[in-house]
């Protein structure tokens, strides 16, 4: 789980993140599999069968989900997140215990800047 690290309204679209990742980080595509906008719209990034580029050392067997925001998130986003996590859990026989924030793997990070387990239950 990630956040976009931006509360700028104009950054509320996966195309912006894709531009950052492709043009500034030289990725092949946006690093995330999903992006959730402030209005709760879930946008698709990389296909699930393509390894993400979102969490060093964890990309090979994970799904990257990013919510737009740094400190500002909406209930619409969290509702969409719960729906998405439930669908992915069902598809891959996982549980909420298998969902982690970026900060669980990189202690220098605060991303996603919210308590993942609290928001997905």
Image (tube, rainbow, N blue to C red):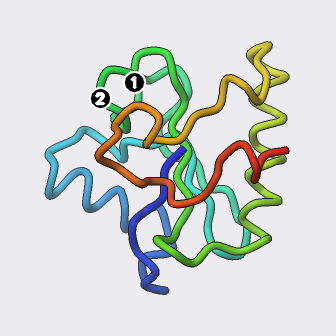
- Front residue (pair 65, 14): 65
Residue 67 lies, with reference to residue 118, above or below; the image says below
Residue 77 falls left or right of residue 52: right
Observer-nearest residue: 63 or 100?
100
Camera-nearest label, 1 or 2: 2
Side (left or right) of 105 relative to 98: left
> What is the quadrant of residue 72 in the picture?
bottom right
Q: Position of residue 42 (x, y in %)?
A: 67, 56
Residue that badge 2 annotates? 56
Label 1 element class: helix
Q: Find out whether the residues at labels 1 and 2 contact each other: C-beta distance under 8 Å.
A: yes
Above/below status of 21 relative to 101: below
Q: Position of residue 74 (x, y in %)?
A: 71, 74
Q: Residue at x 74, y 16 (%)?
A: 92
> Which numbered disc covers residue 73?
none
Please provide percent x and percent y for residue 70. Answer: 46, 71
Q: Quadrant of residue 93?
A: top right
Q: Is residue 5 above or below residue 43?
A: below
Rendering coords of residue 12 (x, y %): 51, 74
Q: CA distance from mark 1 to mark 2?
A: 6 Å
Location of the C terminus (image quadrant): top right
The answer to whether 113 is drawn above or below residue 97 in the figure is below
On-image quarter of the N terminus:
top right
**Furthest-bottom residue in this view:** 9
In this rendering, position of residue 24 left or right of residue 30? left
Residue shown at the point (36%, 47%) measured from the top left: 30
- x 76%, y 18%: residue: 94
Residue bearing mark 1: 59
Counting every numbered tag in the picture gives: 2
Instruction: Sort mark 1 into few (<14), some (14-19) or many (20+) by Cα contacts within 10 Å.
Output: some
């Amino acid at each position: 789980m990630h956040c976009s690290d931006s509360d700028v309204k104009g950054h509320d679209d996966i195309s912006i993140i894709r531009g950052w990742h492709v043009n500034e980080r030289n990725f092949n595509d946006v690093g995330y599999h999903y992006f959730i906008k402030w209005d709760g719209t879930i946008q698709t990034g990389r296909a699930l069968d393509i390894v993400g580029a979102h969490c060093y050392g964890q990309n090979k067997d994970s799904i990257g989900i990013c919510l737009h925001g740094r400190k500002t998130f909406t209930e619409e986003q969290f509702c969409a997140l719960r729906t998405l996590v439930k669908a992915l859990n069902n598809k891959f026989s996982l549980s909420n215990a298998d969902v982690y924030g970026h900060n669980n793997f990189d202690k220098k990070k605060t991303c996603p800047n919210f308590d993942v387990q609290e928001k997905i239950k």
